[in-house]
Image: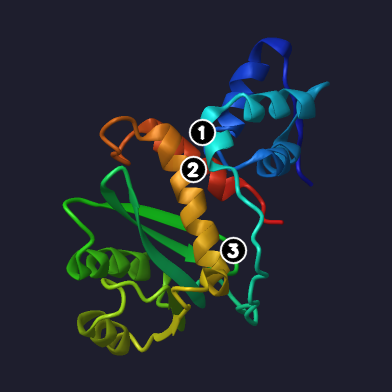
Amino acid sequence: MTRVTCIPDKLRCRVAANLHASHQGLDSMLRRARQTVYWPGLEGDLQHQWSSCDICNAQAPSQSSKPLILMPPPKYPFQQTVVDVFQLDGNSYLAYADRLTGWLEVAQLPNGATSSKILNQLRLYFARSGTPEQVSTDGGTNLANEEMAEFFERWSITVRLSSAHYPQSNGCAEAAVKSAKRMLCGNTGASRSLNNDKVSLALLQHLNTPLL
């Protein structure tokens, strides 16, 4: 049974700020809060925390004009994963996510997203979480070349490519990248480094938030 703690008035602002750390949206904040905390007016306070955040307003998800293409769900964690490279203020990052649990990893790629840097990071994830049967990518230059193809073949991993003109077909990756961008925008500071307490807290809140 989940134990819910009633938060005293003087601590509510601090708890609300922690729930908001990853900038993951009001619904996600409420799902996380309902697992562990309660106080009168909780939903209203979180609504205010979210609506008054410039980053959340700027990064709010837009309604897709096209439906997601659904894939058969994986049977166990890290059987099917997604990987994507994205840019933020001139810095390169790698997002790696599990399709079943939504577990998200984010890594900074200093001085550019070369294939060798991506491979080094993927090796760390495979050693920690296991080798997936399938990896989905958008077929970007540094994710769909001969070096990457040989790497995935050595690890006996099937690669699924989504269309560059129809990213909704890789919806899990799209969601992972959007979550990563929201976290980084509000927590990395001018250097865009991931090595700070704010990023760690944001990622922790994201990972502790139940999926829909």
Q: Nearer the viewer, residue 46 or 205?
A: 46
Which quadrant does the C terminus fall into?
bottom right
Q: Report the disc number at residue 182.
A: 2
Q: Report the disc number at residue 191.
A: none
Residue 44 pos. (x, y %): 78, 25
According to the image, label 3 marks what residue? Answer: 101
For label 2, the SS is: helix
Q: Is residue 79 above or below residue 104?
A: below
Badge 1 density bin: few <14, some 14–19, many ≥20, Cα 10 Å: some
Q: Nearer the viewer, residue 140 or 121?
A: 140
Badge 2 density bin: few <14, some 14–19, many ≥20, Cα 10 Å: many
Residue 168 pos. (x, y %): 57, 69
Circles 2 and 3, Cβ within 8 Å, touching? The answer is no
Q: Residue at x 42, y 74 (%)?
A: 137
Badge 3 density bin: few <14, some 14–19, many ≥20, Cα 10 Å: some
Circles 2 and 1, Cβ within 8 Å, touching? The answer is yes
Residue type at numbered disc 1: Ile
For label 1, the SS is: helix
Q: Nearer the viewer, residue 6 or 61?
A: 61
Residue type at numbered disc 2: Arg
Q: Residue at x 25, y 81 (%)?
A: 145
The quarter of the displayed image where residue 172 is located: bottom right
According to the image, label 1 marks what residue? Answer: 55
Residue 101 pos. (x, y %): 59, 63
Number of marks drawn: 3
Q: Nearer the viewer, residue 116 or 76?
A: 116
Disc 3 to disc 1, C-alpha distance: 26 Å
Q: Residue at x 46, y 70 (%)?
A: 82
Residue 140 pos. (x, y %): 33, 72
Is residue 103 visible in the rendered image? The answer is no
Q: Is residue 38 above or below residue 80?
A: above
Disc 2 to disc 3, C-alpha distance: 19 Å
